Image: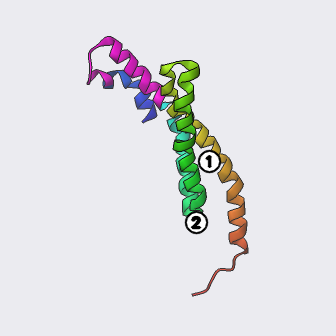
Amino acid sequence: MTLVSLIAASPFVSLFTDTPVISQRSVWGIRVFMIGAIPLAFQYAFVDGLTALGQPQYAIVLSMTRKLGVYLVCTLVLPIFFGVQAIFYAEPAADIVSALLSSAVFLCVFPRILKKRMNTPVPRA
């Protein structure tokens, strides 16, 4: 989907407008918005993995950090320093930062979860 949005943004935009300025800005916006889509897949995988491992406290904090922490801060701060168009970079920045944060947390927490499970006796039915 990321490649499609990067390659086929122009034909997609042309379905909705034929105004050159709007088309050009829309294609730019779509491409910028999709920069963080692939790193975001890591965030989703690690958050879902932590939930599946019975660690929802980590999953909730990581998910909330992405939108309430990083995205909100970027939305408020980026335009101050880089102009109003920089707000389009808030989403990819939040996606990339949250992917890095989720990866780091998962790599720190996962070995402890495995160790705890290895030391816990399995109940017999």
Residue 28 against residue 43 in the figure, above or below: above
Query: Could you tell whether 90 is left or right of 113 in the image?
Result: left
In magenta segment, residue 15: yes
- Camera-side residue of 54 and 125: 54
Quadrant assignment, res 30? top left
Q: Which mark is residue 54?
A: 2
Quadrant assignment, res 8? top left
Q: Residue at x 69, y 65 (%)?
A: 114
Residue 13, given in percent of the width and then of the height, sits at 32, 23
Q: Which corner quadrant holds the C terminus? A: bottom right
Disc 1 marks which residue?
102
Q: Helix, strand, or loop for circle 1?
A: helix
| Gap in angstroms between the C-alphas marked 2 and 1 | 16 Å
Query: Could you tell whether 58 is left or right of 119 in the image?
Result: left
- Sequence-wise first label, 2 or 1: 2
- How many other residues sit within 10 Å of disc 1, few (<14), some (14-19) or many (≥20)? many
